[in-house]
Image (cartoon, rainbow, N blue to C red):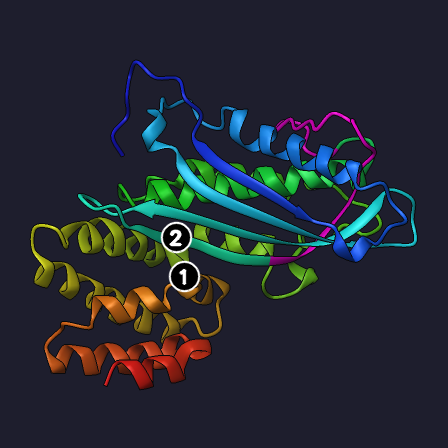
């Protein structure tokens, strides 16, 4: 990351979109337009780090909040799709670094209420009301963690720790879930746990090696960059063998299938075959795609 000392631009170039079609006509749609504006301001105007970013260094990210009604007034269930991209050195290409859907975002919102977040007091007096900003702040820190990890070894640790602080002090209440180990095997608790668990430190190497030593090398030496990506797949294969079904392994692959296919499209046949074998094993969702397109 190239930090610009004269700039004070925020870190995230976020776009938040709210889909309220399932809520129906019983609720004034202006409420959701107001909420969408408030969330965009919350994510893009807040300073999340002490570093200074130039405008062109801001991390591009998208959030799609798909609402479902509940029987309670001003209370909603939602799924949240989080996408973030990282530019590849000397190119206009943006590589997906996060592409994840969180299915458990329950919250309370009354039009024009202030969206507040204090990392020293994550859970307010009303857990349902404070859950929305806690979830968005959590993903802001996770995006920063993965982005910083991709530029320097263990560079994202401070932001993963901030995300874990939110988990440890998360709101509680009816309709609030995703913060606890017992809420499922793939949720906010487990994602940050995997990135801070000392047994899984290899995942930090995976992110750094894939982006900084792999993709960023393609401009100057495509062969070297591709070899490093193949080495990352071997690392992930070893990790998965020792730690099967960990959330972070699946998380890494989401949104990357087309990218992997392009990376190995001009690889020597031996490397392409090895990559295809590993990808079919590690990214089961797209196994048939790799089999068909990486012959």
Q: Closest to the observer: 166 or 60?
A: 60
Chain part drawn in magenta: 102-123
Mark 2 sits on what residue? Answer: 97
Horizontal and vertical percent for residue 109?
80, 37
What's the magenta bit mostly, secondary-structure-wise? loop
Q: Residue at x 46, y 62 (%)?
A: 251
Mark 1 and mark 2: span between their CA atoms?
A: 8 Å
Residue 64 position in % (x across, y down): 60, 50
Tell whether 122 sits left or right of 246: right
Q: Is residue 198 above or below residue 234?
A: above
**Label placed on residue 125:** none
Q: Residues within 10 Å of mark 2 (few under 14, many from 20)?
A: many
Q: Are marks 1 and 2 in contact (CB under 8 Å)?
A: no
Residue 107: percent from left, percent from top:
77, 44
Q: Residue at x 40, y 65 (%)?
A: 253
Residue visible at 25% across and 30% down in the picture: 2
What crowding class fits label 1: few (fewer than 14 Cα within 10 Å), some (14-19), or many (20 or more)?
A: some
Instruction: Please state if 39 lies on the left or on the right of 289 as rendered.
Output: right
Q: How many numbered discs sit on the rendered protein?
A: 2
Instruction: Identify the secondary structure beneath mark 1.
Output: helix
Q: Quadrant of residue 210?
A: bottom left
- Mark linked to residue 252: 1
Look at the image and tell me in which quarter the C terminus lies. Answer: bottom left
The quadrant in which residue 268 appears is: bottom left
Is residue 164 visible in the rendered image? The answer is no
Query: Residue at (47%, 43%) from the top-left corner?
Result: 61
Look at the image and tell me in which quarter the N terminus lies. Answer: top left
Q: Nearer the viewer, mark 1 or mark 2?
A: 2
Q: Is residue 13 above or below residue 255?
A: above
Of the two numbered discs 1 and 2 on the same chain, state the one appearing first in sequence. Answer: 2
């Amino acid at each position: 990351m190239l930090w610009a000392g004269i700039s004070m631009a925020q870190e995230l170039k976020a776009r938040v979109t709210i889909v309220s079609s399932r809520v129906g006509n019983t609720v004034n749609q202006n409420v959701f337009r107001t909420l969408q504006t408030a969330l965009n301001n919350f994510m893009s105007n807040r300073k999340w780090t002490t570093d200074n970013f130039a405008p062109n260094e801001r991390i591009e990210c998208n959030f799609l909040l798909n609402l479902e009604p509940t029987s309670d007034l001003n209370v909603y269930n939602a799924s949240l799709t989080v996408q973030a991209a990282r530019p590849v050195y000397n190119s206009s290409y943006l590589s997906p670094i996060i592409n994840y859907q969180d299915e458990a975002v329950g919250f309370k919102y009354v039009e024009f209420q202030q969206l507040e977040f204090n990392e020293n007091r994550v859970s307010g007096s009303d857990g349902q009301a404070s859950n929305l900003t806690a979830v968005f702040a959590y993903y802001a820190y996770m995006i920063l963690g993965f982005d910083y990890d991709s530029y320097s070894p263990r560079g994202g640790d401070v932001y993963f720790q901030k995300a874990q602080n939110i988990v440890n002090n998360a709101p509680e209440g009816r309709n609030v879930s995703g913060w606890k180990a017992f809420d499922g095997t793939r949720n906010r608790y487990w994602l940050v746990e995997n990135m801070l668990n000392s047994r899984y430190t290899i995942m930090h190497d995976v992110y750094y090696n894939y982006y900084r030593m792999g993709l960023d090398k393609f401009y100057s030496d495509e062969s070297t960059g591709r070899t490093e990506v193949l080495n990352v797949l071997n690392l992930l294969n070893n990790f998965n063998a020792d730690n099967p079904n960990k959330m972070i392994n699946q998380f890494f692959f989401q949104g990357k299938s087309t990218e992997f296919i392009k990376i190995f499209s001009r690889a020597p046949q031996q490397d392409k075959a090895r990559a295809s074998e590993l990808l079919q094993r590690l990214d089961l969702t797209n196994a048939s795609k790799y089999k068909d397109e990486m012959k």
